[in-house]
Image (cartoon, rainbow, N blue to C red):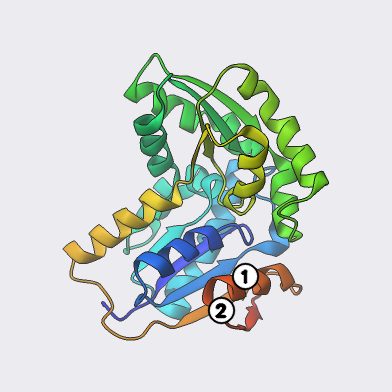
């Protein structure tokens, strides 16, 4: 199975921040990416709906592409569905939040951590509960950021409007004295330069993709599943307009790609 592709999916283009890290760390791995942009954002939807969407996408990745592993490159979808998806499918399914929890725990000095995420992720208390399991004295300041997802999906990564959103979403946690902020949605690393500009370089920004891909590399190595051939990439979406997806992929791969629109409700 080492030559089989890895499936990566997200509610939209945000998961490309994870794909970018995979390309950097595992350049020989072939990837299939699915953006559920027609049904984005996930953060405003209920848990059962998110699970059903995620299951449909996994069915597509397994039945049509025989992937060897699935990366849920979406915090919201992971929290809502990863445990059930692991039971639904015979191949390994992993998400990103646990790696963000561990990284934030390791880098914070004053034990005050900010969480920028979707409303659904903040409400779930997933990050908050798991950080407190590691250290009950940690304080977590969660903030839902729906405008961030819309900014990234529209291809807006900087400028006065985005800076205004960052200022609005971070003022509370900065006032509380956080020294670390978790980017708890895979869309948000595309805004990291703007976020850093607003909050200051002294604040640690934690992108869970880093540790997630390190784990993926270790897993593939241990199972002897590292691809030895040249990597290939395929991109699919539930939407018909995928200009932002194509733009970001070109920046990552330095080439133009086609994005095929899929009727995901068939799965």
| Mark closer to the chain start, 1 or 2 | 2
| Image quadrant assignment for residue 29 | bottom left
| Image quadrant assignment for residue 92 | bottom left
Looking at the image, is 71 positioned above or below residue 144?
below
Which of the image's four quarters has the N terminus?
A: bottom left
Side (left or right) of 225 relative to 239: left
| Residue 237 in the image, given as x and y percentages of width and height | 64, 71
Q: Which residue is mark 2?
A: 254
Which of the image's four quarters has the C terminus?
A: bottom right
| Residue 169 in the image, given as x and y percentages of width and height | 70, 32
Q: CA distance from mark 1 to mark 2?
A: 28 Å
Side (left or right) of 231 relative to 124: left
Asked whether 142 or 62 is in front, the reply is 142
| Image quadrant assignment for residue 213 | bottom left
Q: Which mark is residue 188?
A: none
Residue farthest top in this picture: 137
Residue drawn at 33 percent across, 71 percent down: 68
Residue drawn at 76 percent across, 73 percent down: 241
Q: Between label 1 and label 2, give the one nearer the viewer.
A: 2
Looking at the image, is 195 positioned above or below residue 172?
below
Asked whether 106 or 88 is in front, the reply is 106
Residue farthest right in this picture: 161
Q: Which residue is mark 1?
A: 264
């Amino acid at each position: 199975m080492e030559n089989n592709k890895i499936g990566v999916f997200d509610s939209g283009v945000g998961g490309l921040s994870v794909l970018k890290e995979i390309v950097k760390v595992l350049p020989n791995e072939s990837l299939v990416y699915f953006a559920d942009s027609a049904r984005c954002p996930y953060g405003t939807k209920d848990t059962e709906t998110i699970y059903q969407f995620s299951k449909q996408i996994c069915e597509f990745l397994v039945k049509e592409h025989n992937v060897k592993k699935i990366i849920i490159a979406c915090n919201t979808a992971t929290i809502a569905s990863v445990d059930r998806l692991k039971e639904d499918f015979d191949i390994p399914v992993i998400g990103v939040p646990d790696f963000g929890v561990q990284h934030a725990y390791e880098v914070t000095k004053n034990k005050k951590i900010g969480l920028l995420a979707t409303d659904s992720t903040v409400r779930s208390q997933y990050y908050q509960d798991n950080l407190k399991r590691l250290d009950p004295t940690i304080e977590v300041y969660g903030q839902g950021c729906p405008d961030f997802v819309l900014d990234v999906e529209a291809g807006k990564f900087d400028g006065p409007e985005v800076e205004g959103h960052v200022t609005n979403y971070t003022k509370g946690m900065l006032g509380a004295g956080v020294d670390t902020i978790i980017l708890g949605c895979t869309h948000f690393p595309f805004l990291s330069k703007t976020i850093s500009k607003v909050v200051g370089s002294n604040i640690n920004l934690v992108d869970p993709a880093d540790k997630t891909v390190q784990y993926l590399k270790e897993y593939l190595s241990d199972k002897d599943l590292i691809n030895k051939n040249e990597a290939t990439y395929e991109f699919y979406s539930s939407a018909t307009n995928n200009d932002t997806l194509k733009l970001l992929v070109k920046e990552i791969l330095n080439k133009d790609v086609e994005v095929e629109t899929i009727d995901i409700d068939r799965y």
